[in-house]
Image (spheres, rainbow, N blue to C red):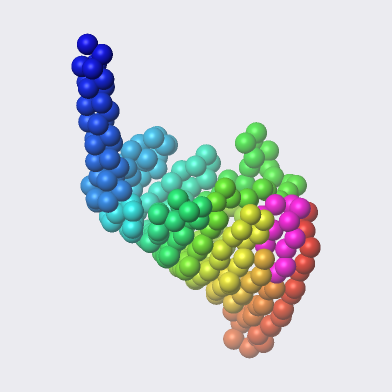
Amino acid sequence: MMIKLLKSLLCSLSTMTVLLAGLVFFITWTEPGLQLLGRLGIASLDNGSSIESIRGRLGRSIEIHGLKLVLGEDRYDIAELQLDWSPRQVLAGQLRIDRLSADQVAIKISGKTRDGQDEEDFSVPDLRLPIGLQLVEANIGNIQIEGLSREPLQAERISLSAHSDAERLHIEPLHLVTPQIDATLAGQLGLHAQADSDLTLQWKFASDSADALATTGQLAAQGTLQ
């Protein structure tokens, strides 16, 4: 009797293991699995978020068109988003993103705290990650951000290469291009208020006026961001 029971349990466990492995393979390495995961993720938000289309494989490369995310009172619209990453590196304690690209990005920020009051005091959040981050290449084009100032902020391009350890984000570098500003930021950014930062900012500013002179400058900052 005990032998039959053990055989039955082993058979059930083997069947469940095979089914689970098949489900993981389906979601991770097939396009229908990625699309199913995307639909379930958007449906779980239940707040007006949507995706027009999603292609690729979760375990390798993801391409999304028409992404609309509503998080609280903030809204993120991204016409095109592509992510190439190495999920196996997570097992070694590192999130490696080989390429992140996006185009036609519109962000609307409410500028209010959860209790509905306008934010006045700035404090450095704790941005420490449970694993390391390796961002090989990120390129974002045609960005518009509303809610940070009276007029929408616009940028033609933002590019970034960076990696992190337990205390700091190493920027190598961050490049921002707007109709008036061309700026480059490089160095180390502390991921919490007590971590030292060492940053260098270089910029070139030119107004829309045809006879205006371009202004260039450089700023170095060291210490904690408190």
User: Can residue 78 be seen by looking at this rendering?
Assistant: no
Question: Residue 15: horizontal and vertical position, in percent?
Answer: 22, 31
Residue 194 in magenta? yes
- Number of numbered labels in the structure image: 0
Residue at x-position 60% and y-position 68% = 171
User: Can residue 59 be seen by looking at this rendering?
Assistant: yes
Residue at x-position 50% and y-position 55% = 94
Residue 153 in magenta? no
Residue at x-position 71% and y-position 80% = 217
Question: Residue 71: horizontal and vertical position, in percent?
Answer: 49, 42
- Left or right of 114: which side holds 85? left
**Dividing the picture into quarters, in which one does residue 207 lie?**
bottom right
Question: Residue 46: horizontal and vertical position, in percent?
Answer: 40, 34
Image quarter of the N terminus: top left
Question: Residue 19: horizontal and vertical position, in percent?
Answer: 24, 35
- Left or right of 199: which side holds 9? left
Q: Residue furthest top?
A: 1
Where 166 falls versus 181 (above or below)? above
Extent of the magenta region: 189-199
Where 60 falls versus 14 (above or below)? below
